[in-house]
Structures are given as C-alpha cells and as structure tokens.
Amino acid sequence: MAKDRVQYVCSNCGRTTPTYMGRCPKCGEFDTMAREVVVSETKTKSGKTRRPVSFNSTPQRIRDIVIDNTMRMKLPLTEFSRVLGGGIVPGSLVLLGGDPGIGKSTLLLSVADMTAKAHGAVLYLSGEESAQQIKMRAKRLDTHADDLYIATETSVSAMVSHIQEIKPVLVIIDSIQTCVSDDSSSAAGSVSQVRAAAAIFQEVAKTTGVTIFLVGHVTKSGTIAGPRVLEHIVDTVLYLEGDQFHRFRLLRSVKNRFGATSEVGVFEMEADGMQEVTNPSEAFLAERQINAPGSSIAITMEGTRPLLVEIQALTSSTAFANPRRTANGVDYNRLLLVSAVLSKRVRVKLFDKDIFANVIGGMTIDEPASDLALAIAIASSNKDKPVHADMAFVGEIGLSGELRAVSQLEQRLKEASKLGFKRCVVPRLQGRRLKNPPEGMEMIPCRSLSEAVDVALIG
C-alpha cells in the first residue's frame, strides 16, 4: 500500500512543490505555499477506495450530435438565467463567489425556491448556518416551496448520500470551504480539501445530471479562495459584486461553458431579498442631474448587453506638489492615460489639478470604449462647462488623441435611443461605415478627442 506524502501548494496559482518555498516559483507571490498531505491514491483515510470519474459515454460523429436547447431550466428570475446563458443547465457545476455579506446566500435561496416550484426537488446544504437560521432568511424572503430541502452538513460523503436519497434537480452547497472530504486529511478550507471536494461534486454532477451550485469565499484581493484549479474544474464561474453601502448588486459571469462570458445581471438589494433590475441603464441614470459640469454618459458593453452609465469627474486645484488621481469604477491606469492625452493633445491644463473619477451605481467599467466619456467628463469639469444632456459617447482614445473604433456600435446606439438620447459622438471611420443608425439617433463622427470636446461642451 502506497504511503501518504507531504507537498506544498500555492494558494494563488496551485503550483505544487515537494519542499516549502517562501516564494512561489510560478506566480512569484510570497507566503502562499500551504502544506497538505496527499492520501494514497488507492485508499482514502477512511479505508474506502476512490474510483475515477466515469461518464459512460460512447464516441459518436459530431454531425450526429443533436443540441437540445430545451434542456435548460428557465427561472422567473430572468437576470439570473441570462447570466447563465439562458437558464440552468442540468449536470453543470457552477461556482459563485463574492464578498461576505454581499448577498450570495440570499440570492441562491431565492433561486432554490423558484427552481423547486417550477422544476422539482432542490437540496440546500449549508456548512455555515443552522437550519433555523436558514429558515429565518426564508421567512423574510417569503420562501415556501414544498420541495425545498434544507440540511446542515460538512462531510462530503454525507452530502453525496443526501443527494442520492432525495434525487434533486438542483443542489446548493454553502460553502465549498466548509466541506471535508475523506480524500484529504487537511483542515477544512485548505487547498487540498477544496480541490478534493470540488472533484467529487464534479463527478456527482456529471454522472447523475444534477446541477450543483458551489458558494466560494473570496480573498482580500477579491479572487475565490483556493487554487485556480477550482475555477478550471467547474463549468461556470460567477461573481456577485457590489458595495454593501450601494443598493445595486452585479452578478458577473467570468467563465461559462454554456453561454457568453462577461455577462452581467443587475439586482437591487431590498428588505425582501434580491430584486432583479430589468432595465439597468434607466436605473443607473435615474438620479442624473442635467447640465451639471463633469458628467457624461458612456455606452458600454457587458457581455452581449449594452449599458448606459454615468461617469462623473471632478477637477480641483491641488495644494500639494503632486496632484492626486482617484478612480472609482474605472481603471486607475486608464485614468492616467486619458488625463495625459487631454493635457498633451487637447491642451487641457491638468498638471496642477486633482482628478476624481467615479462611475455611478457601483459599476466597474473595464473596456476602452468608455475612454471618450471619461475624457469628456474631465474636460467638462475642468472648463466648468456642462455636456449636452441628450448626448452619449463611445470611443477608444489613442495616445495621439485619435478616436478608434469599438465593437457592436449599432447595439449601443439602439440602447441609447431607447432611453431618449438623440445624439452620440462616435469615431469618424466607424460613423461612416454605419449607414443606417437607429431612428431618432444622430451620429456625430469625430476624428480626434479635440473635436469631440468642442462638440460635447455647451458654450
């Protein structure tokens, strides 16, 4: 019988080494190597033999494979279904991460209730809360499905027994860090325990066809705790983002084998749980102050959905030798780039100004297509001139001050037109190519950032 062995695993990238190292040789991070005991491959610590994953499939020609689009389980919570690609796929393994208290358990309990009412039995397994605590949350959410089962358990083998007994269509495990597997002798939440438990749940999902949702804790850097191999095992990775002091929560898909990635669902945290926001653009612009200097509208794409968000900027004279640059919701380096282009190409004096940039509603914008709106907001605040209220902006800014083309311009313009915007500043080359803009929408092609600033500002 093979003996157990000791190895060290990086909690950041999953790299294993036979001896302890202060710095991971793969990712270069310090103090991330955690000790784990690898149990013999033939026997677990309980004496049971682990069998390999078997999907019992037979080879077939790809042209003979039929795609069944009706297999997804659709839910009344359309924002949640859309992020998953149209609904819950049977037999899939989904990982949901987010900050503590952001609403992961609240959202999944609502999903469990809807699934139990529409599709069959649902099993909610919690290793962090008692059944009474979950019942209190369910009462607040008005959850009363007959086929929703609750159990408090941390043993993976006991969880599998519950699944085999009830035969649910959906299983929610809250959380993967509390699970203890016989395949590892490490403590719960360690790298080896998380990886071993995820592998077992993957086997259960693929062999039985039950959908399993795993709740994952996040680290200080915002990534799901445990090695990256955990994200490779699952089919879909979702992040629930937002600030506890903001009412909006964003459900973002960063990996999805059954749908588009980077999809975003918008929810609003209320007393009776998470309520979906069917028109996020309208919600983000609801409190917008018209003709206020330093405010502009960006048309950004989140997955396949265009969103209109308000970007605000404030410039003020600094009392220090080095002016500050503060970014909230936009990339800090992107803010520096846009500020440098404004100073060099448009002659906007920012060398003695503090710049604060903010995206309203708790949104985080990463795509370069929002560069133009950010630059217009900064220029508007610095010149103390408002932007035309019916104008939106889309375009990437180059280092020479030119406006570059963006993707899916027609979809962006349609969304802006629905919300009452009449004009949109776009890159000149792309504006010429788009022959039929949406009805009631006027495109204003601009070649450079300087032209766009002259067109956008009033007075």
Image (spheres, rainbow, N blue to C red):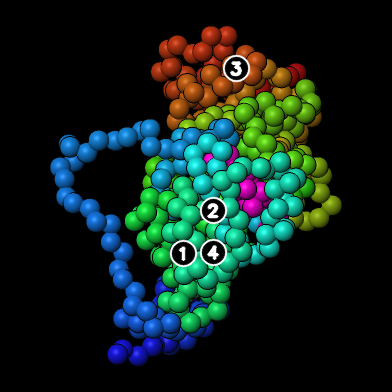
Tag 4: Cα neighbours inside 10 Å, few (<14), some, or many (≥20)? many
Q: Gap between marks 2 and 1, in whole Å?
A: 12 Å
Residue position marked by numbered label 2 in the rendering: 123
- Residue at image location 49% in from the left, 23% down from the top: 411
Q: Secondary structure at mark 1?
A: helix
The quarter of the picture where the C terminus appears is top right
Q: Secondary structure at mark 2?
A: strand
- Residue at image location 53% in from the left, 25% down from the top: 412
Q: Nearer the viewer, mark 3 or mark 2?
A: 2
Residue position marked by numbered label 4 in the rendering: 176
Tag 1: Cα neighbours inside 10 Å, few (<14), some, or many (≥20)? few
Asked if residue 272 lies in the magenta stretch, the reply is no
Q: Secondary structure at mark 4?
A: helix
* Mark 4 vs 2, N-terminal side: 2
Q: The magenta stretch spans which residues?
A: 100-115
* Mark 2 vs 1, N-terminal side: 2
Q: Gap between marks 4 and 3, in whole Å?
A: 42 Å
Q: Residue furthest top?
A: 440
Q: Are marks 3 and 1 in contact (CB under 8 Å)?
A: no
Q: Nearer the viewer, mark 4 or mark 3?
A: 4
Asked if residue 110 lies in the magenta stretch, the reply is yes
Give the amino acid type for the residue marked by disc 2 in the picture.
Leu
Rendering coords of residue 150 (x, y %)? 60, 56
Give the amino acid type for the residue marked by disc 3 in the picture.
Lys
